[in-house]
Amino acid sequence: MKPMKHVTFALIFFFASTALFAQTTTASAVQQDPKAGQSTNKTLEQRADEITAGMVKHLHLSGEQAKKVRAINLANMQHAEAARVKYKNDPKQFAHQMEIISETRLQQIKEALTQQQFEQYQARREEKMGVPREARSNPGARQQESSYQNQY
């Protein structure tokens, strides 16, 4: 993959992964309060809370894990926003910085989750990003899918 395509993919992957877990929470908030979906200018704290709530729900995080993950989400969103402002006239440098932020966040999330939770997190991220099953990073899931397919 060419470097610029790799950077672009990393950027898309980062932003999609942060939005991924917020989708369920946002949808339920809109059902409870129709005006909630109209505000697109949410603070970084609100967005971090939504993403964390989705992760708590889907990954069954403990209270301590939820605190760690929220701090990770918020800090990385703050770094991303600072990079956006700092490199607004230098898209190449912005893309490079976002790649670093994305890799750092992924490592921090991995350290905060159990191995099983992280595998679920990765699988869900890759699924939402449209990564083909054959290319996904969870070989155990691929083997399990194969065994299910062979049963039918």
Image: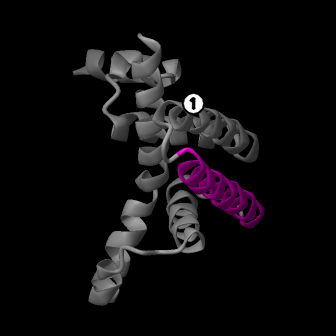
Please give the name of the residue rendered at 56% of the width and 38% of the height, measured from the top-left corner.
Answer: 98
Pick the front one: 48 or 7: 7
Please give the name of the residue rendered at 56% of the width and 44% of the height, measured from the top-left corner.
Answer: 87
Pick the front one: 106 or 145: 106
Q: Position of residue 8 (x, y in %)?
A: 41, 29
Q: Is residue 86 left or right of residue 39?
A: right
| Residue furthest out toward the front | 89
Please give the name of the residue rendered at 28% of the width and 15% of the height, measured from the top-left corner.
Answer: 150
Position above or below: 142 against 27 = above
Q: How is the image coloured?
A: one colour
Q: Position of residue 85 (x, y in %)?
A: 56, 54
Q: Please state which amino acid type lies under the numbered disc 1.
A: His
Q: Residues within 10 Å of mark 1 (few under 14, many from 20)?
A: some
Name the image quarter holding the C terminus: top left
Could you tell me what secondary structure mostly forms the magenta stretch? helix
| Residue furthest out toward the left | 152
Q: Position of residue 123 (x, y in %)?
A: 46, 35
Q: Position of residue 11 (x, y in %)?
A: 46, 37
Element class at badge 1: helix
Q: Is residue 83 left or right of residue 38?
A: right
Position above or below: 144 against 43 = above
Pick the front one: 126 or 47: 47
Please give the name of the residue rendered at 59% of the width and 58% of the height, measured from the top-left corner.
Answer: 60
Name the image quarter holding the N terminus: top left
Does 82 appear in magenta? yes
Does 92 appear in magenta? no
Position above or below: 146 against 91 = above
Residue interval drawn in magenta: 63-87
Residue on which disc 1 sits: 96
